[in-house]
Image: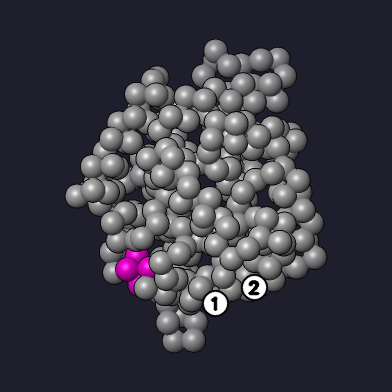
Amino acid sequence: MLKDGMFFEKYQAVVREKKSIININLDPALPRQREKFVIPNKYLAEDESDTLLDFSFDIIEKVSDYCCSVKPNTQYFLSDTKLLGKIASKIHDEGMIAILDHKLSDIGSTNDIALNWVSEMKFDALTVSPFAGNIQSTVEDAHSRNLGVIVLTLMSNPEAELLMVNTRINGIPTYQFIASEVKRTNADGCVVGLTGFVQEEYIKNIQKSVGDKKVFLLQGIGPQGGSEADLEKINLVSNPLVSLGREVIFSNNVNEYVKKYYDLLNRVRKA
């Protein structure tokens, strides 16, 4: 069974080893699926599974010197979910943590099956939505399978403000209630946006609620509208894991782009 803090200890170890707090969002869209931010032509193969795998492996290799985790999103691999296990293995081979961005949210018996599959794929953690109300049982089942749980706590898309800030549970904003549940249930971390309507006060409130041994998976830098100034918000939390995505993985020079953020984040973190 996963001991309390085990995912947190993995996070700490890889941050020390890589001297990095960068997570890469691996969202490989095919050219037929959208117009911008798609897999370049040089990776295209007759078999789309080969395309997805070749691109993913190349990105994982290119970012490995400057990142401590990679987070593939299930939605981009629905045509062949077996690829996810291969990708998790490659992430580990490159010395990084593998997080599945799955946003699990269902009844307990269904969650249990999903957690079984994610465990068999050898991921270290997955993202979970709190809106089914069963964080406690999800955390217990995940921990029994050596999986960390990172709970969607405060998203930064405009629509989330109504549901997560303006709506209240037990007299407090929903995001604060979710943060208190992260602490109570011994979940391993929070997904928190850095941009848009998200104020520094909100992030401070979450940090106060969850305590010092939770990982903050911070989203929103790059095409989602984040600026270098938003990066300074990482110093509001004890254990940041800053996600970078499309701007890096679809750039002309992945190594150069991720190193730019590596240097910038290390300067900001030490300031």
Q: Residue at x 60, y 36 (%)?
A: 92
User: What separation in Å lies between label 1 and label 2 (alpha carbons)?
Assistant: 8 Å
In the rendered structure, are the residues bearing label 1 and label 2 in contact, judged by CB atoms less than 8 Å apart?
yes
Tell me: 1 left or right of 186. Answer: right
Mark 1 nearby-residue class (10 Å; few <14, some 14–19, many ≥20)? few
107 shown above or below 156: below
The residue wearing badge 2 is 136
* The quarter of the displayed image where residue 115 is located: bottom right
| Label 1 residue SS | helix
The quarter of the rendered structure image containing the N terminus is bottom right
Is the stretch drawn in magenta largely helix, strand or loop?
Answer: helix
Q: Which mark is residue 106?
A: none
Q: Residue 39, position in %: x, y?
A: 54, 24
Q: Amino acid at mark 1?
A: Arg
Q: Residue 171, position in %: x, y?
A: 44, 86
The residue wearing badge 1 is 184
The magenta segment is: 202-207
- Total marks placed: 2
Q: Residue at x 42, y 71 (%)?
A: 211
Q: Work out whether mark 1 precedes mark 2 in sequence or the reverse, and give the earlier one.
A: 2
Q: Residue 82, position in %: x, y?
A: 75, 35
Q: Residue at x 41, y 66 (%)?
A: 212
| Label 2 residue SS | helix
Asked if residue 204 lies in the magenta stretch, the reply is yes
Tell me: 141 left or right of 63. Answer: right
Residue at the limit of the structure toward the bottom, as seen here: 171
